Amino acid sequence: MRRTALTFAICLLVVVPVGAVAATDGASDGTVSTGTTAGVAQGPSAAVAAQQAADNPCVGTMTSQPDRTTLYSIQGARGGDKTSAMVVGVHPNGSVVGVHNDSAAGRWWSYDIDVIPNGNVLQSTTYRRDTLVEEINVTTGEHASERRFRNAYDTHDVDLINGDELLMNDMSQEGEDRVLVYNLTREEVVWEYSFANHTDAFPRSGGGDYGGDWTHNNDVEKISEETYMVSVRNFDQVVAINRSTKELEWTLGEDDNHEFLNEQHNPDYLQTDDGKPTVLVADSLNDRVVEYTREDGEWNQTWVLRGDLVEPRDADRLPNGNTLVADRRSHRILEVTPEGEVVWEVYAPWQPYDVERLGTGDESSGPTMLDAGAAGAVEVSGSADPSESEIEACYDHLTGYDSSRLVPADEPTGTVTEPGDDGGDGDGSNGSGTDSDGTDRDGTDDGDGDDSDGSGDDTLFGTTTSDGGSSGFGPTPLAPLLGVSLVTALALGALARLRD
């Protein structure tokens, strides 16, 4: 009897915690995948890419080709219908390398993507209304690691900064909109800016009728050691926040003044050769991409791309001076010249959110239009102008694609971003004072840690999580499970001794 009881106790200690995690492995019914990589198709080689391009219904205008792979995320919505959220890798000729299907892994939306120094892709997604930050292995297309943030809602943007910190936005739907820095080593929030504590700049009466998410801050970027740039969409503003003082260093735009911006997305910070601050932004509801340069304390519009764009979500300036655009409602990715000519185009149904060209650095890394001598207003020209049936055919092609690898086998997958520290919407989706560590909320402790130490196998988070697993803002339930198992084992042992 004693041997039986001890054997049962050991089984409890081993099986209960592991089973709690493994139960959701690989499921596609709303649970979170743990990211196994066995049996993953490796994607087409360069030798067959040309033939695939000819057979690919997702290729539009193609008058020139880049040197590297392009990655883009698709949010996943067609009108009121939910479609697959995914990340797609495409060859320079537009043929598909592979598709990472987030919906199949239980995610709801796919948002910002960044290539981090280890070559993997960092992406912000949502899972059961929580923010889930995932690291995608580009050679397999599977989840290398991930972390769930239970107290952050519908995070559109996550950037890796300072080597071990995540700069991210949070739209809580409960009036607690904020931007924050989460330290992976310390496993806690080390800085935040809560908009509820700065209603002098962002009054509750502004921002439109959006309930608790009255700011809808949808993008954040580190532009210096002391300054973070934030897109405050519902206020039609891009602002620079001083990390130390939490004062606004500058503001671009004005609430409800749509001459400047109208519910914008994904602004990128650049500087002219002589140091003038410049912002390139997808000016979504103005159906344009616009660039502003700050001179003598004023923002001047120096370049605008308009015409044949419908709610663009992202615009990145490339080193060659062209601009890479995710055109949301036209369901396509465009590379356009400073004069507006489309030279590279692929389709991206439904609702592309972010686009990155490998080897060009994170976000924008090219010249300002002032430095390129191309200031002014230009019209989009040369698009293939796909029909709805063509977009439907592309969606069928992407969702039926059998490879999840995002980068070709012959392309480098190490550090693909340039050196440096910095490595749609929630529509339809289901305190005061400053603490010593820089937090800006009243009575909140988000930093209880989790079971991932961030040191495993050259991945950002060290281990994958699962439903009910580790969380950036709270303790893992594995510890209680282990405790229950231990108590059970001791009880069984005592019972065995009594019966002997």
Image (cartoon, helix red, strand yellow):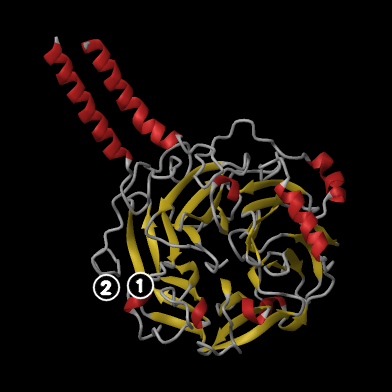
Q: For residue 83, say whether it is visible.
A: yes
Total tally of numbered discs in the picture? 2
Task: Give the numbered dot on residue 469.
Answer: none
- Could you tell me the amino acid type at mark 1? Ser
**On the image, numbered disc 2 is attached to which residue?**
431
Relative to 131, residue 185 above or below: above
Q: Name the residue rendered at 58%, 41% in the picture.
A: 142
User: Which residue is the extreme one toward the front?
Assistant: 499
Give the mark, 1 or 2, whose residue is nearer the N terminus.
1
Q: Quarter of the image for the C terminus: give it.
A: top left
| Category of crowding for the residue at label 1, using alpha-carbon neighbours closer than 10 angstroms: few (below 14), some (14–19), many (at least 20) | many
- Could you tell me the amino acid type at mark 2? Gly
**On the image, numbered disc 1 is attached to which residue?**
194
Q: For residue 118, say whether it is visible.
A: no
Residue 469 occupies quadrant = top left
Q: Name the residue rendered at 42%, 51% in the picture.
A: 148
Along the line of sight, which residue is nearer the eye, 140 or 396? 396
Q: Name the residue rendered at 44%, 70% in the picture.
A: 228
- Whether residue 36 sits left or right of residue 383 in the image: it is left
Compute the Cα span from label 1 to label 2. Answer: 9 Å
Where residue 471 sits: x, y (%)?
Answer: 37, 49
- Whether residue 245 sits left or right of residue 140 in the image: it is left
Which element is circle 2 on? loop
User: Which residue is the extreme one toward the left?
Assistant: 498
1 vs 2, front mark: 2
Q: Quarter of the image for the N terminus: give it.
A: top left
Along the line of sight, which residue is nearer the eye, 437 or 77? 77
Where residue 135 sits: x, y (%)?
Answer: 52, 47
